Amino acid sequence: MLHEKLLDCRRQITEAREKIKSLEEKMQSVVLRVPQDKFTKAIASILYWEFPEIKTATLAEKLGIKGFFSAKKHVEPYQLFICNKCEYAITASTKSKRTEIKRLHREGNLSCPNCAKENREERTVAIERIWKEREERFKALKTMPYAEYLQSPEWQARRIAHLKSSKFSCQVCNKKDTPLNVHHRTYENKGNERWGDLITLCQDCHKTFHGKR
């Protein structure tokens, strides 16, 4: 019974596909029957944008144009949205471009070319400013007295991160549930430590480590 139902569904799908194909071919023939002198660029543009079933080659034939890409050039741009920043009309020249514009609009990232360029330049300036501020902060942390550095929010965040990465256990004896210290193995990168620059030690291992130095 199940097998027969599935076969029947497959048969209906096949028939529907054949019918769709037949209707699409009929659409091509309807377009081809339009008198040549009445088939304007405006009509071709409407068909191109609103009826994706109509082949571009069919439109090219009616326009008396040779070539798929040449036909696209004769299609009027499709206006989709207005730029929120400058009210510039944002248009698409191809269906793939229209799809991209719609996606950007859904994501809230749509801008006209000029505003997009301005946005990129503003982001570049902002990123450069952030990096400059970070570099200046790194320099300040590196030259900061050690006791003061240990009270900085950067060190506190890095200390917690290293404790978490070591699963809150001593990296020498694996002792847990005991006071732990995050020890500097080197001060070369103070203010911007790498994971290997630090080690989590219990108080006993910390004392032993300093006793060896």
Image (cartoon, grey):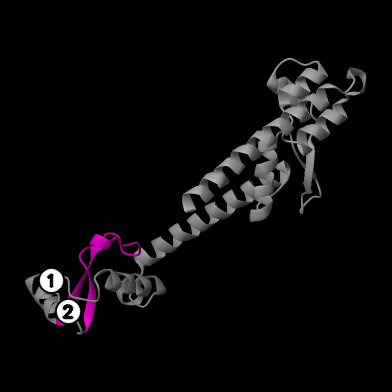
**Where does the image place residue 177, in percent across and percent down from the top left?**
20, 84
Residue drawn at point x = 55 percent, y = 43 percent: 10
Magenta highlight on residue 193? yes
Q: Where does the magenta region start and end?
A: 179-203
Residue drawn at point x = 59 percent, y = 38 percent: 14
* Residue 118 visible to an observer of this rendering: no
Q: Which residue is mark 2?
A: 202
Front residue of this view, candidates 177 and 209: 177
Q: Quadrant of residue 13?
A: top right
**Helix, strand or loop under label 2:** strand
Residue drawn at point x = 48 percent, y = 53 percent: 2
Front residue of this view, candidates 59 and 164: 59
Front residue of this view, candidates 151 and 80: 80
Residue drawn at point x = 38 percent, y = 66 percent: 141
* Marks 2 and 1 in Cβ contact (< 8 Å): yes
Say what amino acid the circle numbered 2 marks. Cys
Quarter containing the C terminus: bottom left
Task: Determine whether 103 is above or below 205 in the image.
Answer: above
Say what amino acid the circle numbered 1 marks. Val
Mark 2 is surrounded, within 10 Å at the Cα level, by few (under 14), some (14 to 19) or many (20 or more) other residues, namely many
Q: Taking 147 as reference, is 122 left or right?
A: right
Q: Mark 1 or mark 2, which is nearer the start of the sequence?
A: 1
Task: Determine whether 103 is above or below 153 in the image.
Answer: above
Magenta highlight on residue 201? yes
**Where does the image place residue 130, in percent across and percent down from the top left?**
52, 58
Q: Which residue is mark 1?
A: 172
